[in-house]
Every structure is written in structure tokens, then in C-alpha cells.
Amino acid sequence: MEAKITLLPGDGIGPEIVAETRKLLEVVAAKYNHNFNFNEQLFGGIAIDETGTPLPDDTLAACLHSDAVLMGAVGGPKWDDPRAKVRPEQGLLGLRKALGAFANLRPVKVFDALADASPLRPEKVRGVDIMFVRELTGGIYFGTPQGRLDGDNGREGFNTMRYNEMEIRRIVEIAFDLATKRKKKVTSVDKANVLVTSRVWREVAQEVADEHPDIEYEVILVDAMAMHLINRPADFDVVVTGNLFGDILSDEASMITGSLGMLPSAALGVPGSIGLYEPIHGSAPDIAGKGIANPLATMLSAAMMLRSSLNLDTEAAAIETAVSNVLNAGHRTADLARVGETAVGTKEMGAFVTMALENIQTV
């Protein structure tokens, strides 16, 4: 296969983890006789510093002319002024919009070797394998009107939560499609007891559920869901929800695994569109440049990219197996290491995964 992959290292630890993942993908290409053409572009805070915008025209053009986009992280204290008119996160929102990436897939899977690393009891988290399906281009993050005012009562900020039937239906249909390939269960999360937006969401989601009688379907209020994720996380399969609730709940669930450094994500649009893949952990500026960041979430994001955008299931599974084998062998980065365990650095962990991948037998 010949594929164009745009790399957006971004800020903080982004360049370090993307560099290790690129090495891994180069091994994949050599091992399975593919040709991956990488195009690295400015994005996020570093792009603001060098071009004045978080999503330069050259970066956007490269992304739109690629088969897939792999991102590191954006943002950091340098660009955190709430009064700033240009922020790194605007680039990410703009890129998702340009790619038509309305569905955010965030798998939360506990590797057996890391069950003891979870803040929850091991018996609570063993077997946890949840796919969060978060609507990504609507809701309160994009609804209008929004803005800031200075009035008689001082400073005021306002945002609008909006969803229409089309936006709801297409994201819920993705959830049900995923469920057919998993444990055949969908949980829809809303706040219909308070929000009119959620009442419309619930109506449309139920209509989609009625079209899939073979899939178990349930509805849970967002506050109750926040509690259930801690009390009984293994009970869930595919969880679908809106932009704001999905952002918060998937981050909460990520801690079940023991570290944000283990969780990949994909932002997808209609079939055949360009996918955006990224770890969910952020730029971690406090450890940037120290060589201790965990690259596994980015590597697992690359596996999602191979599977979803390039239809390379065998290669994706090989990366996931390599990661599992490395963890089973006891190798841990600082975020995963327990007291008394020796932590390895970013490059060392990358090398371990690459070596494990090379040792996997091809059929």
C-alpha cells in the first residue's frame, strides 16, 4: 500500500511521542511491504509562534491531501491567556471541522498487565473494554450565539448548546454499527431531565435503537453515568453521547486504565473521509523535553489509523499485540511504574515496542 500520512507533532511532549510512533510505522511499512509517505507540519502553539495561526494554510492543505492525519498534542501555559484571541485549541477545532470529523472514538481498554495500576480495585477493572463515541462538531462547543460581554453586572460569557436531528442520528448510527462488531450493547448518555437539547437527543436515539432490535440499548443520565463508570465500568460496551458530556466522561473513564498515557482516539467523518488520530492525554508541558513521556497512546492511535483509514487490520493488530507484549514483559514508563519499579524513558519504550513488533511472525 502507498499512503500519505500527515504528522502534526504540535506542542509539549507531542514531538517526542510522534517521533517514536513514526519509527514504529516505518517498521510496519518495511515488515508488511507498504510505503508510507510522511509529511510533518506545524500545528497548535508552535504554529502560532511561527505563523500567527494555530492551523496554517500549508498545514490544512497537507491534511486535506493525505490519507490520514496523526497528531501529538497542542497547547501549554505559554498560550493559556484566557483573553488571547488566538489559541492552539482553535486549530484543533478548525481541523476537525475541515475534515468533517464529527465522530470521536475513544477506546478505554484495561490491559491485563496494568490492572493493578488502576486507582480502582483490580477486580473492578479487569475486562473493561469501552468504546466511547462522542459527537465532535456540534453541541455547546460550536453552538451559536456564543461570546463575551461587559455589562452592568460585570463580565459575562455565554455559550449555546444545540443539536439537530441529523447530527444526533449520524453519531448514534455509528455507535450501533460499532456495537454489532462488539458485545451488542449501546448506552446513550444525556441530561433529558433538565435540557431540551437532551430530550431531542433521546427521541432520535430511541428511533435509531428501534431500527436495531438485536442490540441491547439503555439510556443513562450523565450524572449517574459518572458514578457508574467508577462503580461498574465492566458493564459497558459502546457509550454514545454529545460533545460536552463525551469530553468529560471519556476523560474520567481514562483514569480506569491507570494512566492517560495509554489511551488513543480517532476523529472520523463519513466513510472514505480523512481521519484524525491522536492520544487523549494533552501536551503535558511539565514533562516536555525530559524524555519520560509515555508514547503508547500515540502508538495505539497509529493502530487505529491503520485499521480505520488504511484498512490494514493485520498491521493494526500487530501494533496492539506488540504493546501488550511489552507491558506483559514488565516495561513501564514513569506514569505506569509503581513504587519500586524502574521506569523507562520515551525512546526506550518506543524501542521495546518496535522490537516486539519485529518479533511478531507474519503469516
Image (cartoon, grey):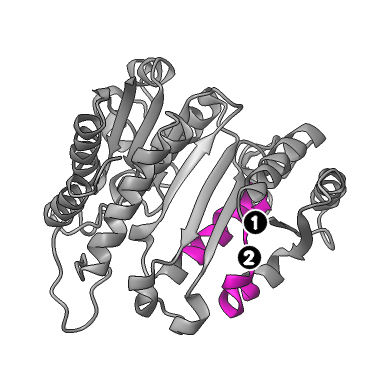
Does 231 appear above or below 351? Answer: below
Look at 68% across and 37% down and name the residue there: 143
Is mark 1 in CB contact (under 8 Å) with mark 2?
yes
Q: Is residue 238 left or right of residue 315?
A: right
- Residue type, label 1: Val
Which of the image's four quarters has the C terminus? top left
Residue situated in front as seen by the camera: 281 or 187: 187
Does 247 appear above or below 92? Answer: below
Look at 31% across and 47% down and name the residue there: 319
Magenta segment includes 244: yes
Q: Quadrant of residue 218?
A: bottom right
Residue 148 - label: none
Which segment is the magenta one? 227-254
- Residue type, label 2: Phe
Which of the image's four quarters has the N terminus? top left
Name the residue tied to disc 1.
239
Magenta segment includes 97: no
Question: Dot 2, how many residues are within 10 Å of its Cα: few (below 14), some (14-19), or many (20+)?
Answer: some
Look at 48% across and 25% down and name the residue there: 274
Give coordinates of residue 123: x percent, y percent: 49, 83
Q: Is residue 172 left or right of residue 65?
A: right
Residue situated in front as seen by the camera: 286 or 21: 21
Name the residue tied to disc 2.
236
Look at 13% across and 74% down and name the residue there: 342
Report the number of discs: 2
Question: Dot 1, how many residues are within 10 Å of its Cα: few (below 14), some (14-19), or many (20+)?
Answer: many
Spatial CA distance of label 1 from label 2 is: 7 Å
